[in-house]
Image: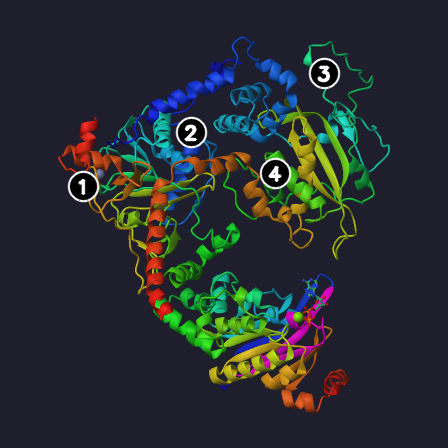
């Protein structure tokens, strides 16, 4: 980790009319760091994630991102062209529902290759080889490269979505419940895989989850949200082993009882 | 109501106000090669989809001294070409020709003439769907953004899928091109055989899409590159045999079914080109039969 | 042996001659006169005027005759004429509140100022073929009201008095109403342009879309606040004179469809409206238009866009029957150059396929 944060979030609030999405959220994300955002349903996790990833316009507050050249840029002041470029090169976004993040009607190979082509790769053989490589890394067998995601299981689709996002070596990946709709054994394998990838690639990531086990396994640091507010944050082990807020204690104890 | 009460139409049908509006769109299109300029397309007295875009462009640039050629599928005598030519004879009383060389303006549907066009000539294309991204993304709001931000990755995804499925790019007409290194453009449904003719052409190329209300242009001497992969370069169609009438090689051929027993022959799709070659003594293997028949 | 097809010109002119013959039909019958079409096929004429966006009964009737009764062809002919007409200026908005109503019904109030007025309607006729129309029987003169001519208050104004329905709406400061026929159409559109497009949109298409909203594809819980048919004054501002002059009266059909709305943080609960306005007498079209207009306002009211009728690009891009018929029918133009290219490709792919099969066979036999 270097001494400058990758993402600087200050006082982000989002209101849907009179309803609060999230309120006054501030934090720094450091290179190579994985931050988990946990909290019960409706606590504002997805809202916050979408504000950070410029998929939603926050009502107030600012998000600054350190570009590859080292300059800090206010995301709200970037042109749409710059934002979209970031989205398809430097960032990844893994949706809870893989169908939202994949092109369901094109082959797995093209799904992975799309970002490469978008940044100018023009050698079919190389694109295919890289796509094949990545399918291997997410444990999809090479002979499925020309199949469409429709023909994949839920777990395979999620792994394909991850490969599609990581192929351009992004620096920052946003994930919204990446193990959401999967059954428990599939979840465990996917988590293992994700943990390996994040470590190998030195990725920074923000992972939204309501599952504390996911936070424990993947993240260095975590934030607990309730009613749109961050009520506790700290190193993951500290928060889970020694929760300070009564609400966090409740969350942790309820999961431990399971 | 007598017919005399109905309008007497302006030179080249459109009123001067409308022509000015179209000319402004054309000038803008020339200034930004490959960019689709929206224009307030008019109803024309022929149906949308039958060349109204091309007709409006031609009407806007046509002068009394111009010589007009109209082709459809490469031929001057296809019914729609005949009809459009007759329209301009009627409303502009303009000189017409079938000779590519003699024309100052050539309006075309689906072909570029075989003979090299020269400086001072204008080729006007009739365009049904101007948006090369349309079948990948149906929304106008989204495709305009993709052009603005030069987000053309999706175009190559389509070509990638072709190769993955067929071993080669399976697009045969309306093959997308990149113009002057910036805009991806639909060359109209010409066969990809004609794509290389667009590159660095001496002639001005104008594209009119009436129903979709877009005009775009390729100015003379402009780079027009067909999209491809380094290891799967763009290729044009080739034909096994020369034209059966004039013996031309390296031209686009129409397949003509001769009987119900599988008999067929291949002849130039560009009828003027074929006639010029026959007139200067070139002969294909069926040319004798043809003369005998006449 | 082979002679290229020639003579397109002669073929076309012969075809048109035959068309003229068929249009005239049996010469022993009198030719139908434009005045007869205007007088006796009035609703056909009205539809042509509405969708051609040109208010001229005689020309519309001529187009109907020229098109042999093919409505879309007639609309097309009249549009192609309209487009060549010079533009003198833009009239003031017509005041439908001041309409001289011939028909006016409301589904939301049993009785209301001005009353329910059925007018010349097919409603409540029994759709039994009427043999009396086979012959030219005497038709009774209609009964006329005595006090005709009084303007009748609009139902939307009655509701607006209590603030129960959104007001007529106002355009943003400095917004000049667009002109669909003069400027390129771009998405997203403002409502003024959208209404223009709907007003000339195909009756059948809008009917189907409006119907789909009733069946649950973007339900809006509509009530006919009011349908009114009658004549309105068209006025043109005369800057030189400093006042507006009347150009005459035209017949229009207006529909105000009242729809549900729960209210938001900014607005108290109130009814919203869908609007339909078309030339002539065309209740079906005006009602369908108002349903579709309301459905298309989904985004304005923060409603989810889930159905075709709410999708502006989809609806507006496909509502124009002159465009639609041209493009559908253009498929009969020659496409043999493209087809040749595809033929060539399919042959090549079949050769590859057969080669691959041949290669596989011996292995399988082993
Ligand atoms: N588009 C919207 N319009 C209005 N309110 C919204 C919208 N999206 C979210 N909200 C509200 O904002 C609050 C936070 O929602 P959000 O989706 O961020 O929660 P979450 O923590 O991601 O929940 P979950 O774990 O169920 O996904 C909730 O009260 C929700 O109802
Ligand atoms: Mg969520
Ligand atoms: Zn030839």
What's the CA distance linking mark 2 and mark 4? Answer: 30 Å
Q: Is residue A198 placed above or below A106 in the rendered structure? A: below
Rendered residue at 31%/55% (across/down): B225
Single out the mark in the foreground, 3 or 2: 3
- Residue A180's spot in the image, x, y percent? 64, 74
Single out the mark in the foreground, 4 or 1: 1
Single out the mark in the foreground, 2 or 4: 4
Decide: marks 4, 1 in contact (CB < 8 A)?
no
User: Is label 1's Cβ within 8 Å of ligand 3?
Assistant: yes
**Most extreme residue toward the left, as rendered?**
B281
Magenta stretch? A19-46
- Which chain does the residue under circle 4 lie in? C
Q: Is residue B97 placed above or below B186 in the rendered structure? A: above
Q: Which residue is mark 4?
A: C205
Q: Determine whether, in the image, residue B136 is placed left or right of residue B202.
A: right
Residues packed near mark 4 inside 10 Å, few (<14), some (14 to 19) or many (20 plus) = some
Rendered residue at 64%/26% (across/down): C235
Q: Which residue is mark 2?
A: B14
Decide: marks 3, 1 in contact (CB < 8 A)?
no
């Amino acid at each position: 980790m270097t001494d400058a944060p990758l993402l600087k979030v200050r006082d982000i609030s989002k209101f849907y009319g009179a309803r609060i999405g999230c309120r006054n959220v501030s934090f720094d994300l450091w290179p190579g760091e994985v931050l988990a955002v946990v909290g019960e349903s409706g606590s504002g996790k997805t809202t916050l994630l979408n504000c950070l990833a410029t998929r939603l316009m926050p009502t107030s507050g600012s998000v600054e991102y350190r570009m590859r050249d080292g300059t800090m840029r206010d995301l709200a002041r970037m042109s749409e062209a710059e934002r979209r470029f970031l989205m398809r090169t430097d960032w990844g976004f893994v949706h809870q529902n893989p169908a939202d993040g994949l092109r369901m009607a094109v082959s797995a190979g093209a799904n992975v290759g799309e970002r490469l082509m978008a940044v100018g790769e023009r050698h079919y053989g190389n694109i295919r080889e890289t796509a094949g490589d990545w399918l291997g890394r997410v444990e999809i067998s090479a002979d499925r490269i020309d199949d469409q995601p429709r023909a994949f299981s839920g777990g395979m689709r999620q792994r394909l979505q991850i490969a599609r996002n990581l192929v351009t070596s992004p620096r920052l990946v946003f994930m919204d419940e990446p193990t959401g709709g999967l059954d428990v054994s599939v979840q465990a394998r996917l988590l293992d895989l994700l943990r390996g990838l994040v470590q190998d690639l030195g990725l920074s990531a923000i992972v939204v989850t309501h599952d504390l086990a996911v936070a424990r396994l993947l993240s260095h640091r975590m934030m607990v949200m309730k009613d749109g507010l961050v009520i506790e944050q700290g190193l993951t082990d500290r928060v889970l082993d020694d929760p300070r807020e009564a609400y966090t204690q409740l969350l942790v104890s309820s999961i431990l009882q399971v | 109501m007598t017919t005399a009460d109905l309008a007497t139409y302006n030179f080249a049908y459109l009123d001067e106000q409308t022509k000015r509006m179209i000319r402004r769109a054309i000038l803008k299109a020339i200034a930004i090669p490959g960019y689709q300029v929206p224009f307030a397309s008019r109803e024309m007295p022929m149906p949308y989809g039958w060349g109204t875009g091309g007709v409006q462009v031609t009407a806007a640039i046509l002068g009394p001294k111009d010589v007009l050629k109209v082709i459809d599928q490469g031929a001057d005598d296809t019914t729609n070409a005949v009809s459009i030519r007759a329209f301009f004879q009627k409303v502009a009383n303009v000189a017409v020709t079938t000779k590519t060389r003699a024309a100052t303006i050539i309006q075309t549907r689906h072909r570029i003439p075989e003979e090299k066009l020269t400086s001072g000539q204008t080729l006007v294309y009739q365009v049904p769907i101007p948006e090369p991204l349309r079948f990948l993304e149906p929304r106008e709001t989204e495709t305009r953004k993709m052009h603005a931000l030069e987000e053309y990755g999706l175009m190559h995804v389509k070509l990638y899928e072709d190769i993955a499925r067929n071993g080669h790019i399976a697009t045969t007409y309306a093959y997308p091109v990149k113009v002057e290194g910036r805009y991806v453009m639909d060359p109209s449904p010409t066969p990809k055989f004609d794509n290389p003719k667009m590159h660095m052409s001496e002639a001005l190329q104008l594209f009119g899409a009436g129903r979709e209300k877009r005009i775009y242009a390729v100015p003379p001497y402009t780079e027009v590159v067909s999209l491809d992969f380094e290891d799967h370069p763009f290729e044009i169609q080739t034909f096994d045999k020369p034209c059966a009438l004039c013996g031309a090689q390296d031209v686009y051929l129409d397949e003509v079914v001769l009987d119900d027993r599988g008999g067929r022959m291949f002849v130039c799709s560009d009828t003027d080109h074929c006639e010029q070659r026959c007139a200067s003594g070139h002969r294909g293997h069926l040319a004798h039969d043809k003369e005998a028949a006449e | 042996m082979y002679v290229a097809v020639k003579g397109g010109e002669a073929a076309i002119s012969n075809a048109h001659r035959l068309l003229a013959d068929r249009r005239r039909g049996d010469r022993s019958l009198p030719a139908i006169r434009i005045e007869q079409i205007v007088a006796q096929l009035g609703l056909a004429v009205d539809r042509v005027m509405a969708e051609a966006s040109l208010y001229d009964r005689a020309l519309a009737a001529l187009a109907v005759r020229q098109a042999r009764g093919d409505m879309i062809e007639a609309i097309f002919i009249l549009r192609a004429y309209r487009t060549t007409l010079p533009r003198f200026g833009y009239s003031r908005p017509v005041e439908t509140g001041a309409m001289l109503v011939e028909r006016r019904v409301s589904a939301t109030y049993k009785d209301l100022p001005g009353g329910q007025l059925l007018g010349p309607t097919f409603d409540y006729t029994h759709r039994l073929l009427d043999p009396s129309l086979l012959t030219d029987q005497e038709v009774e003169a209609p009964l006329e009201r005595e006090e005709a001519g009084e303007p009748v208050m609009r139902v939307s104004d009655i509701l607006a008095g209590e603030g129960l329905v959104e007001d007529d709406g106002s355009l943003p400061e400095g917004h000049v109403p667009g002109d669909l026929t003069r400027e390129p159409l771009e998405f997203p559109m403002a409502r003024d342009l959208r209404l223009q497009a709907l007003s000339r949109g195909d009756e059948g298409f809008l009917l189907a879309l409006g119907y789909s909203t009733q069946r649950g594809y973007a339900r809006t819980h509509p009530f006919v606040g009011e349908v009114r048919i009658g004549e309105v004054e068209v006025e043109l501002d005369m800057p030189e004179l400093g006042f507006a002059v009347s150009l005459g009266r035209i017949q229009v059909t207006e529909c105000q469809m009242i729809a549900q709305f729960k209210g938001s943080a900014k607005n108290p609960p109130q009814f919203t409206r869908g609007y339909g306005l078309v030339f002539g007498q065309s209740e079906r079209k005006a009602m369908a238009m108002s349903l579709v207009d309301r459905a298309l306002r989904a985004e304005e009211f923060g409603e989810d866009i889930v159905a075709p009728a709410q999708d502006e690009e989809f609806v507006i891009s496909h509502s124009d029957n002159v465009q639609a018929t041209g493009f559908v029918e253009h498929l009969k133009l020659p496409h043999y150059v493209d087809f040749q290219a595809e033929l060539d490709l399919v042959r090549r792919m079949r050769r590859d396929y057969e080669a691959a099969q041949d290669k596989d066979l011996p292995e399988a036999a082993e």
